[in-house]
Amino acid sequence: MFDVDHSISLLKQCKQLPESHVYEICSKVQELLINEPNVVSLDTPVTICGDIHGQLHDLLTLFSTIGEMPYKKYLFLGDFVDRGFYSLESLLLLLCFKIRYPDRITLIRGNHESRQITTVYGFYDECLRKYGSANVWRYCCEVFDYLCLGASINGAIFCVHGGLSPDLLNINQINIIDRKQEVPHEGAMCDLLWSDPDDVANWGVSPRGAGYLFGANEVDKFLHVNGLSLIARAHQLVMEGYKELFDGKLVTVWSAPNYCYRCGNVAAALTIDDDLTRDYTVFETSLQDVNNVPSKKPTVDYFL
Amino acid sequence: MDEQIIRSTDNDALSCRYSLTLNTYITDPYLPHILTGFQKFLKYETTAPRRALGALTKPKLPVINRGSFIRIRSIDIIIKRFIDQFKESSKDGIRILNLGAGSDTRAFDILTLNKEKVEVIEVDFPDSVKFKKATILDNQFLSNVIGYPFDNEAHRSDEKFYHGLDHTELKTERYRLVPMDLRETDKLKSFLSELSVKPTLIISECMLCYLNTLESEALLTTLHENIKQGVLAIYDPLGGEGGFGHVMIDNLRLRNLPLTTLLEFNTLKKYHTRLQSIGFNKVEIDHMYNILNHWLPQDEIRRISRIEFLDEIEELKLLLEHYCLSLSTWGITFDHGLRFNDSV
């Protein structure tokens, strides 16, 4: 029998759930997500978290540092999976929280929540290794297609995984995208998940091969048109955990400490209070040594 | 450090090169022959690192592919410019000396493209030399490339053939594969003193980092004192000043691979000073992220950017900023026209 509280407790111990329970979690979450608009409206106080990338132990550190649900409200900006050792457990834990406390946690889609990217960056292989078939990966990818694309906090802060798109000037335009599909290679939906802020006049070519680089002018324009004061996004590794750009009109939040067990960075989460003040919580990895990762061979690559 | 552990890093280099060919970053017509050698002879090499062939062909992440690409490409660029400048102008031709060459395929490419006036010498541990020698002598194509007479009837069984080989040097008119532990400075000194004087490009590609401070200092000093006209190209990791270097040391300790100088010469400045204090007067250096952005033509950058989605540019930047390439020149003037870091 599927019991969400029991599943949460298993996932916190990094234990594998039966395939049927994964199916159940994914179906239940889909029913919740299908009702969410492309851009979800949220109220303060809320804590914004950036990329997680399967670093389950660090995700648990995040919750224990900031506070547990339902006492705290969370917004995750995507990239739950790939790269880390426990993509599946990290994702399922977040999905179980969504089922348990649907109003206390919002999940936005990142560029890694995609069939194509997860086959390159580890999540597909992880599912195959743990379950011997791609079924679980398929259930999860179905969920990915239902994840919303952005959030608006008190109508003043726009939250997205990547950034802006030359095809979008108004948040209302985002709400008419048909989001229930694999992340396309170009266009507005792709850009929201892939773009990066940069020191360019307006728009630039992204070295990632998808999305755009956008400059201060475009941020100003977007904030002005939509009556906003801040864009909060994730998507880029920041060694200090967070980084404000463009006179504080944009912030990058990164929540995967010692990313890929190699980068040596700290992580952060951003809590927005009722008066819209920004409170950054910086935290370090709980896994000081990849040797402590149970039953996993470290696959940290260097040029040797 | 244990010889076998150092040798295991050649498998990493080889698997990165393989991944680049698989993903069309580079073409390497010699690599399949090297891999054939691995398939045939690894099982008879009792001292070889115990890593399955499967690990060699495991796919690499895009960030590793891009970093491996610029590592290989930057050294190829230096080799080409060195050959272009000195091959014709030097009466006695030129020499390329690859230290710790392992399974590198560059020698075959250089010898194929330059039928005369270029001599290639590869140096590595005796067991590595024997392994590569077996691969070459067993292979008609590679034997032809180095100019060694191929004997089709030389062996009936791979095992007998392999065990029948000794650890001595493989030598042809233009190619030498020399067994030597580069930490044995006296042997290196007498080897170098027998070489004729001609412009010599020395390649140390991710090799120096496995020696401790004293060993690396002795090696560098020996090279500087015993080669009259030299260009020394060194590719090495840099510990840096943040957490990256410490994490790298922790991670590689799991493979028993200590990097004792990583945090000692941890910045471009300190690495530069290290080379100058050996006596190299002209030293140029930069980290690999700058080299990736400065050395390649725009259309090549575009081409490799399109091969795979790179999920994280900052990670690539961080990784490549922790590897450096230096050029030390003495006894000749090398007009390479390549951009290095001018603030060091």
Image (spheres, coloured by chain):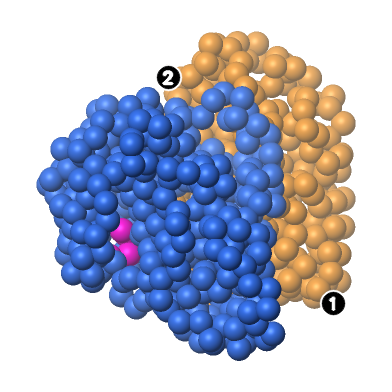
Chain colours: A orange, B blue
Q: Quadrant of residue A181?
A: top right
Q: Residue at x 81, y 34 (%)?
A: A184
Residue A78 in view of the camera: no
Stretch of the chain drawn in magenta:
B208-212
Q: Secondary structure at mark 2?
A: loop
Query: Would you say the magenta stretch is mainly helix, strand or loop?
Result: helix
Name the residue beneath numbered marker 2. A247
Residue A217 lies, with reference to residue A122, above or below; the image says: above
Amino acid, disc 1: Met
Q: Secondary structure at mark 1?
A: loop
Left or right: residue B83 versus residue B270 is right
Q: Residue at x 48, y 19 (%)?
A: A199
**Along the line of sight, which residue is nearer the eye, B27 or B206?**
B27
Q: Residue at x 72, y 47 (%)?
A: A117
Amino acid, disc 2: Asp
Task: Report the disc number at residue A1.
Answer: 1
The alpha-carbon separation of the residues under discs 2 and 1 comes to: 52 Å
The subunit letter for the residue under badge 1 reads A
Left or right: residue A271 versus residue A105 is left
Task: Have a look at marks 2 and 1 and say if they share a chain.
Answer: yes
- In percent of width and height, residue B279 lies at 13, 45
- In percent of width and height, residue A47 lies at 54, 43
Left or right: residue A10 versus residue A177 is left
Residue A151 lies, with reference to residue A15, above or below; the image says: above
Residue B218 in view of the camera: yes
Left or right: residue B188 versus residue A108 is left
Instruction: Between label 2 and label 1, give the one nearer the viewer.
Output: 2
Residue A238 lies, with reference to residue B222, above or below; the image says: above
**Along the line of sight, which residue is nearer the eye, A301 or A195?**
A301
The subunit letter for the residue under badge 2 reads A
